[in-house]
Structures are given as structure tokens and as C-alpha cells.
Amino acid sequence: MVTIVAAGIFAARAALVLGSVTSPAQEAPRMTWDARAAEHLLNRAGFGGRPSEIEAGVALGQAALVEKLVAGRVEVEPFFYERIDAPDPRMMKALSPEDRTARMREIREKDRRQLLDYTTWWYDRMTSGEDPLRERMVLFWHGFFTSSFEEVKRSWLLIQQNQLVRSAALGSYADLLRAMAKDPAMLTYLDNQVNKKGSPNENLARELMELFSLGAGNYTEQDVKEAARALTGRGVSREGAYEFHKRLHDDGEKTVLGVTDRLDGEDLVKILLAQEACPRWVARKLLLYFEGVEPSPERLADYAAFLRANEYRIQPFLRRLFLDPAFYRDEVVGVRVQSPVDYMVGFTRRLGVQVPTSVLGSGATLLGQRLFWPPSVKGWDEGEPWITTASIMQRGNLAGFMLGLVKVEDVLSEAETREPAEASESDEPPMTDGAMEEGKSDAPKGEGRPMKDGARPDGAKPAPKKEGKRIGFDGAALYGLRRAEAAGWTPSINLSSRIEKSGARTDKEIADRMLDDLLAIRAPADTRALVVAFLARERTRLKLADGKLLDAGPEAERVLRRLAHLIYSLPEAQLG
Amino acid sequence: MSAGDRATFDRRRLIAGGAAAFGGLLAGPALGRPGLRLLGPFAAAGGDTAPKTLVLLQMTGGNDGLSMVVPHGDDAYYRNRTSTAIDRKSVLAIDKYRGLHPALGSLKSLYDAGHLAIVEGCGYPNPVRSHFKSMDIWHAASERGRYVGEGWIARLARTAWPGEESPELVVHIGSSAPYSIFSPTRPAVAFGSPEVYKWFAIKQADLEAYRHAGREAGKEAEPGEGGGGSSAVLDRLRGVLSEAQESSLRVRQAATSYVPRVAYPATSVGNSLRVAAALIDARMGTRVLSIELVGFDSHNNQKNQHDGRMRELDESLGAFLRDLRGTPAGKNVIVVAFSEFGRRVQENGSGGTDHGVAAPVLVAGWGVRGGILGRHPSLTDLDDGDLKHTTDFRSVYATVIEKWFGADPSQVLDQRYPPLAFA
């Protein structure tokens, strides 16, 4: 049975319930509201801004810009998803093993494609810049209350979960916690299906405390055991809806965090929300995410108290944070390592170039952040852990790809995309299986390796050998890049005309302009000098005087694109 | 010395090492491999010796230990296993009770020669049956998984080689780096294949020239120009990038010029082990290499799938060890092959096995003392259908840390685990 459900319409309601409570202690912030501050706010509350947007933000003023961000735009084009039902076990039993495998494969294929479509939709939301703070918070919650397709296996349950955080992104954390404790994707992901009276499974109970509300050290193992009993019976129907199995629920007396009663799941959430540790945990997560540095104990205590006083509502919390002069201190501005999603989305936003969303998703995946595939229930480790010797180089290479200067085959070898082993016969999706499976039907066939000078051979090479079912991480990552390349996508940018319009002429002026346009941070003096040195050398090669680079026409465009590639490859471009 | 100076200093040192290796490689294989060795960075210190090195071979997906080290003398095995069973006649018998999977011919020879240790029944208390969480526990060497904040190899590196600055001290060859090598302070060197471990933005020499020009000009710039907050993070990232560029060059040089003594199978794990041998041979200061063999999650029609994995394991590991045999590195490389868990004793209804608990760890190498270590878990005294682990896997780690590398296990592991006799 196929049911079409409109999601996203719930988002419209979310804004209505958001009041605005301002702490009496909060006075007009004393700080300089300038381009540095406005850019910082746009980086952290959204995915970065173009120079024109930064200027507009400065002109608008801090209070008005913050208000615009936290108010948000809530009418969203809905994503229509299909409920893909799990096969009827009786029907499956009647099939031959081959047919059963084929049927499972068909369903999984459909699920993967739907999730890929939704991911594309999500990236479109992020790049559009229409509701930047909501998108920022959706990404935050996706890492906070995370579930993985690897284990959930049903695309629409994850889509539903994502729509839930989307609608409540700036609403009440308390509501979200309550909803997550019965969210079908979460119940599946954390095995609550098998949490039954007499044979409890502690997975959900533990993560509810450790990751979703209190943090380790604020409860005992005994609390986990008892909380698991409170959650018994919360399951998912075959149709994918939340279902409470009264028979499987342990109705006996339990003691969780000092409260003794015949507790159920709702009681448990109430107990968690009443803990001192809860607002502290959530406030710390938010401060850490938005500021990129561990808050001082005083700052944490202050914000935790504020969160509690505002009944866990996120909107007033963020309003207060974005108006807080301390949010703009040197320790915070420009020192956070951008996540892969930030890097990819920020690239298109700052350069103002349309990049196919499949490329953005593939790029972020390649760099270690694949939406709906978190590495663990803890989500992604933010900050410097994103950077490895390979990833820092691949970031630059991806920028080169998006600038039309680097080919897929240069970035990753064919060998990486193929697993030598025969197809797995498993009923479970294999460990490293990825979206690449779609590649079987419409991945470009017969792609040849580009010649050294970038020209491509005329004759197409035979298609790569049958791509095994188990495609590695990089296989999934490559798919979107390949697809864009096969479709003949090239970025439509004209950097020389932009520079021309801006009035920059000398090496120094062009360097400043390019760095200010492309970086999310103010470039340090030595970086500016480096870029000037690059331009001077290129100009000398073209035998042009300083101030005459643009006279070189197409050559000038090539120089500027290579410069953009260089800038995006620098460590400076990883910060924001 | 400022961070910038230090980075430059390190870079010079690295360039020197790289150039030496390159010099040897330029001479080509005709010059003979000993020539290359003498030019390597370790030559001065140790002559014709090689540093102790660990190769971690991760069998991802939950390897069915009972199909790898087969308890052919146990009727309970044949009672519980029908479609996945390895029949008595084809088992490569080690003793009356156990034997190796028939595809593990090379490993059997290695065992007979006394250089393969089988550590029985490895696991940990309160087993987790999630691939990821269990793998995290193996990587972190702690039930806390990723919450410990650092992988066990990163802790080992910090403890055992505190002053070692070679970027290639710990290397993962594969698409995504395992948590075991994650360190919050030191970037991991990880690459899928060496040919593409490179940066397209600009030639390194040019970048250096521009940076130099930039530094010169920077002296004249007014203080405070630019700005953008703390430069500590930026300095660290610049360090990572220069490490990456150096490492990229050296890794590619090492891999492309390496001439193995034996043919490696053209599989992913075969390629990875060939690259591992190249890095070991190039003496880049690598002490830990991590490699992955995937495809062990055999819920369904296990036999074909698992047979294939065993063949891959044996062919690639066999080639690697033959390649190293007789070289200075040969006796100094230890391979530890592990999986996040074993599988349940009883087959499921679809010719496969579901996620289980304990499984043997293989330890191989020409410097390894072979044999059967630990006790085989009972196939009848089960815990809810699962084998009860008889050896904590951290005993394997503790042995590697203490006996192999001579480091203090208490700095790496949360408590003492009895060492094993393989080293």
C-alpha cells in the first residue's frame, strides 16, 4: 500500500507558539556592529553570506538582523514522501529465496532513492538561504537526536524524524525530547522494539540520559536499568507508526533519579527535564556548537538558567546568544573548523555559484559527513576532528571540482569505487553499502580518464566492471560528482567581470576583494601577501603591469579561478 | 620558537627525509634494495634493522569465528551449523579439536612454522551487538566507545613515541579512518589509494614561495591588519596541510616505486597490504598501519560469502608476509586481525548467522610466537545463544603495547589485562 503524506506543513505552526522572553539582565549590548560581526553571525546562524548580504546586515543593525533570523520564514515547499511498507512476512515466506532477495533489494533501492531525493531537497533548503537559522538548527538537531539509515533502513521514518526537528527547530527542546522518546526512527535505531517487560534493552534509556538530556555522570547504572523498564512497550508497528504494546510494558514500580512510582515513558521524560543537569547539557551543546569553544562555567551556568527559565525554548536562547557581545569575542570569531556540510554549502553561498546538490552531498560525504548516516548515535564530532591530512587536501580538490578545474578522476581513482568482492547475499544492507547502488542504472558509462592536459579522449572506454554491491564510502561519495560531470555540468561564474565591476585593479586590490568575497573569516596579513605574490607572479608570466591583469581576457579569468581554487584550498578557508 | 618556526623546521626535517628516500628511489630497483634502506631516515640509528611495527587488519561486519577457526572436534558445532558448516574432511586441522578454514592454507603453513597465534574467544563484558558501537569499543579499547575522546592507537602513539614527529607514524590505508587512530591533537594520515592522495591547488614549492613572500611583506604590514581571532587553530591547520603535502609526496613515491618480491592479489585488501609493505620498506617512521577487509556481515547464505572473505584474507596476508620474509622489517612486523564480534552459535533460518559475541583474534608475523592462546569458549555453555568470551581483547592490546613496543599499557588502557605469550 502506498500513502502519500505531505510533510513540512507543520513547520508553519511552529513560529506561532514562539513567544519572546527577554531576560531582564539583558541590556543593549556594547560592541561594534561591523562587517566582522555581521559575517560571524551569518556564518554561525546560517551558512555564510555574500559581501552584499554582510553589508545589508550591517546596515540593518544587529537587533533587526537577529530578529529576522530567529523569526524565520516558515512556509516551506513540502516534500512529498512515500510510505514504503516493509514486506508482509507471510507473503515473503511464500516466495523462493531468489525472489525474496529480489523483492528486498527492490524495496531497499526505493528507500535509498527516496532518502537521496530528500537529502537533495534538504541541501536545497540550506543553499537557498531563505531560512538560514532554521536550517542551521535542523543540522544541529540531526546530530543531537540522530538516527542512521544504516540501522533504521526505512527512508520515510528518517524523513519523518527530520521533519519533526524541522518543525520544532526553534521551538521547545522539551517537546522534542518527548517526541524523540516515541519517534519510530529513534525507537528502531536504539532497539526499543526489543525492550520488553522481563527482558529489557537499555539502549534507548541509556542514550536518552547520556546523550539526549543529562550527560554521563549525572545518573547511575541503576537509573539506566530502571529507565529502560519505564520505556518497555514503546515500539513501532509494521506500518511504521508509533505503537504502545501494553502487554510488553513493565507496569511495576521503578525508581529513576530518586523518583519512585509505576513510571512510564512520559514520566521518565518529565523526570529528565526536571534535572539540574538537563538545561546545562543542552545549553552546553548549543554554546559549543555555535561558539566552537567550551563555555566557561559561569557562562554555562548563566545560559543554562536562562534556558530553564524559558521552558527550554530555543528561540529566546538563540536571540540572547546572538545579541550577547561575548558571542563576538576574538576567542570565538573565525576559529571554528567548518563541518563538511558547512564547507560545501558555504562555498556555493559565498561564491554565489549554483552547484548541483548531488555534488554538495557527495562532497560532504567524501569529507566525512553523510547526512542520515552519522558515525554513531553521538552524531558527528565537530571542530578540528574534521581535519585529517587527506580531508584537508580533498576539501581543496572539491573546491577545484566546483570551480571546473579538477576532474573526478583526478580526485579519486576508479579503484576506490570498486569493491572486488562478489555481491553480498545478505538480507541486511551491508556495512559500507551506499547510495552508489543507484549508480548501476544511471552512473555515467564509458567515462574515460581525462588526458593530462584536461582534454578527454574521444573514444569512450568500456564501462567499469560490474560494480559490486558493496560499494565503499567513497563510492557513495563519488556518485554525485560523477553524475554532474557526466551531465556536462560546469560552474557558471565570471570572476573577471565581478572584479571589473568591483573596481579592483591592482594585485593588492584584487587580492583583498577575492579574499573578502570567498573566505568566511578576515584573512590575516600574511595570507593577503601570499595572494598578492600569486597574482604578481601570474601577471609577470602574462607580461602585464600591475593593475592590468584584467586586460588579459580569458587568461585573466583562468588566473582568477586558479586563485579562487588556491584560496579555498588554504587552511583559512576551513574556518568560519 | 613560534609555531610558525616550528612548522618550518619540521617541514625541513621532513623534506630531508623525503629527499633521501626519493634519492634512493630515483636510483631505481637496479641499485638494489639495501641501498635504499641505507638512505632511509632510520638507517643511521639502526643500521640494517627496522622499527617494530603493528599492522591492524580489521575484518568489518562481524567475522564468524567458528568458520575461521573451526571446532571440528565438537559435535555441538555440527549440531548448530548445517549450511555454514565446514566439513571435517576439508578442515586444515591444527589439533583434534580445532582447525583452520580450508582457504587459509598460507596461514596454516605459518601456524606450522610457529608464527601464527590464535587467541581464542576474544570479547569483552556486556557485549554490544551493534556493528558501530562494538567496533567503537574495539577502537577505543573501552566500553565507553567514543566518549573516551581518543582511539587506543592514538593513546599508544602518545605514550610510546612522544617525540616522534613523522606524519606517517600512524597510517590508515582505506577510505575512512577508524576511530582507533583518532587523536584530538594530531591529525591522522589516511588515504584510500596513494595515487590520489594529493592536492591539486598549487605546487608545493610555489606555495612555499608565496608564503615566503607573504611573510616578508607581513613584516611591513601594520600590526593588527587582517585579524580574524586566534591564530592557534590556523597555525595547526597550516601544520596539517604541510604535513599532508609532505606525506602525500612521500607516500606516492614509496608506493609507486615499490617492487614487491611476490605478487599480491588484485583485491582491495591486497592493494592495501602492498601499500603497507611499501611504506614499511621506505622507512618513513611508520609504526602502526591500519587496513580493512569488509564483507563479514553474513546474515544470509553465509557459506559463499565467508569462504570468499577467507580466501581474500589468506591470499593477501600470505603475500604480505612472504614479501616481508627475510627483510629487516620481516621479524619486526606484527599483524593483528580482529573483528567487532563473532556470530551466534546457532544458524538463523536463512543459511546465515546473526550478530554474536566472542571470536578468535589472529596474530601473525615472523617475529610472533605462534600457538593457541586462551581457552576455546564452550559451544554448549552459552549466554543466551552466544559464546562466552574467554579472553578480554585488551589482553591482545596490552601484549602489543608492552611486549612488542615496550610501552606502559597502563598509560593506554584503563586497567591491567594479563599479557599473552605471542610476543
Image (tube, rainbow, N blue to C red):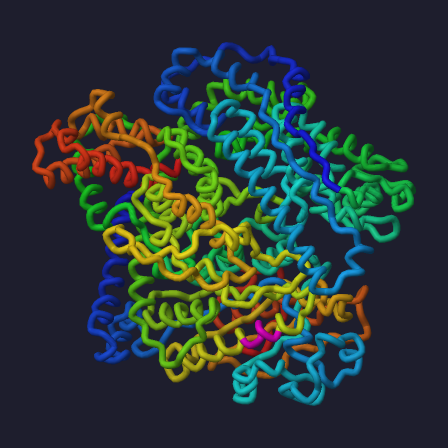
Q: Residue at x 52, y 23 (%)?
A: A131
Q: Residue at x 51, y 25 (%)?
A: A132
Residue at the front extreme of this rendering: A459
> For residue A500, what is the image quadrant?
top left
> Relative to the observer, which residue lies in front, A387 or A156?
A156
Residue B257 placed where, x, y %? 29, 70
Q: Is residue A270 left or right of residue A299?
A: right
Residue A280 to residue A325: above or below:
below
Q: Is residue B309 magenta?
A: yes
Residue B249 seen in the current view: yes
Residue B88 to residue A211: above or below:
below
Residue A333 placed where, x, y %? 41, 28
> Relative to the observer, which residue lies in front, A193 or A494?
A494
Identify the magenta region.
B307-311
The rendered magenta stretch, by its main secondary structure, is classed as helix
Q: Is residue B83 left or right of residue B6?
A: right
